[in-house]
Amino acid sequence: MVRPHLLNLQPYSSARDEFDQSKVDINQFVFLDANENPFNTGYNRYPDPLQRELKKKISSIKGVPYDQIFVGNGSDEAIDLIMRLFCSEGDTIHIPYPTYGMYEVSAKINNVNIKRSLLDENFNLGDVDMNQKIIFLCSPNNPTGNLLDVQSVLDKFNGIVVVDEAYIDFSSKPSFIKQLGNYPNLIVLQTFSKAWGLAGLRLGMAFADAEIIALLNKIKPPYNISSATQKLALQALARNEQTDEWVKSIKSERSRVAAELTKLPLVKDVFPSEANFLLVRIEGAAEIYHELVGSMIVVRDRSQVVRCSDCLRITIGTPEENDQLLDALRKSK
Ligand SMILES: *Cc1c(COP(=O)(O)O)cnc(C)c1O
């Protein structure tokens, strides 16, 4: 599946990787190898290109072996690298839609063809072409909020199956990372941007067979994750009870907001959600969007998206923010 010329690519060799570090205490060394500034600013040294400490911690939390973990500058970097690892110009990927927009943008940047298949009225998978290079399955799906039948695709798809689990922490179902051992063509994406509350850091994870991870590491920019990001992510991973609390609050607010929205006459449908947002069908969605902006509340207008006519995608905020939203909608019209 890999583009042949990448299999033999000699990757950029960073200065400190050219000798065996396993038997020495690297902190005792004098570094005159990378043209860094010797004066200590806290950030005068290049970061670890393989993010070893960070990935060891992720490995222990996620229960995925270290050599099956890739970290990127957001999931978006992983999506782009996956596209470039497997697809030459003219290859075709499959995207069930409506879904997250980055798969399509990344395909277009790389001049890769897109075969789309429309989700049905309940946002479930329709006809899937099992013979394309890559399929991108966003589950829970953005913007519809439901889980897709990933297993049915894994059992039949003949290319690479990318399962984007950006919202998995808010879901009632487990991650597909447990299936990595059974499917060498499976890549699971997760992110620090949602449950971990670190969208501003830009840190995404890809979990896959060790061979795929080694190839992604080979083609990534050598220092793709800054020292600051690696340090702050480690701090976040050390306080994962905080993340669990946030997730609990967001899930309970999701139920409360859904119940309150259902009571409003304007609201036609509140779709079940396994994510940290609700897709809501509401009379005059586009006008409501602008009314909400007038009340200094921004939601996502998805009313022009196929299968999502008259729909707003509303992220679950703090209880106070959710109350502001509900008050504004109650006053509407
Ligand atoms: C928010 C989101 C992401 C996160 O992307 P990052 O680049 O990691 O911030 C990934 N996939 C989907 C479907 C999302 O909605």
Image (cartoon, rainbow, N blue to C red):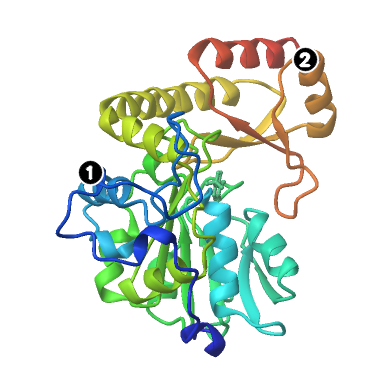
Q: Residue at x 65, y 10 (%)?
A: 327
Q: x%, y% of residue 170?
A: 40, 38
Tag 2: amino acid: Ser
Please state which of residues 282 and 149 is positioned toward the viewer in this rendering.
149
Q: Residue at x 55, y 19 (%)?
A: 260
Quarter of the figure with residue 33: bottom left
Q: Is residue 205 left or right of residue 116?
A: left
Q: Residue at x 38, y 68 (%)?
A: 213
Instruction: Please say if 210 is above or below 146.
Output: below
| Residue mark closest to the camera, 2 vs 1 | 1
Tag 1: amino acid: Gln
**Residue 28, label in figure:** 1
Please state which of residues 307 and 229 is positioned toward the viewer in this rendering.
229
Q: Which residue is mark 2?
A: 332
Q: x%, y% of residue 28?
A: 23, 43
Q: x%, y% of residue 5?
A: 56, 87
Secondary structure beneath label 1: helix
Q: Say whether disc 2 or disc 1 marks the residue closer to the N-terminus.
A: 1
Asked if labels 1 and 2 touch by Cβ distance under 8 angstroms, the answer is no
Instruction: Please say if 179 is above or below 98.
Output: below
Q: x%, y% of residue 50?
A: 37, 57
Whether the residue carrying mark 2 lies under 8 Å from ligand 1 is answered with no
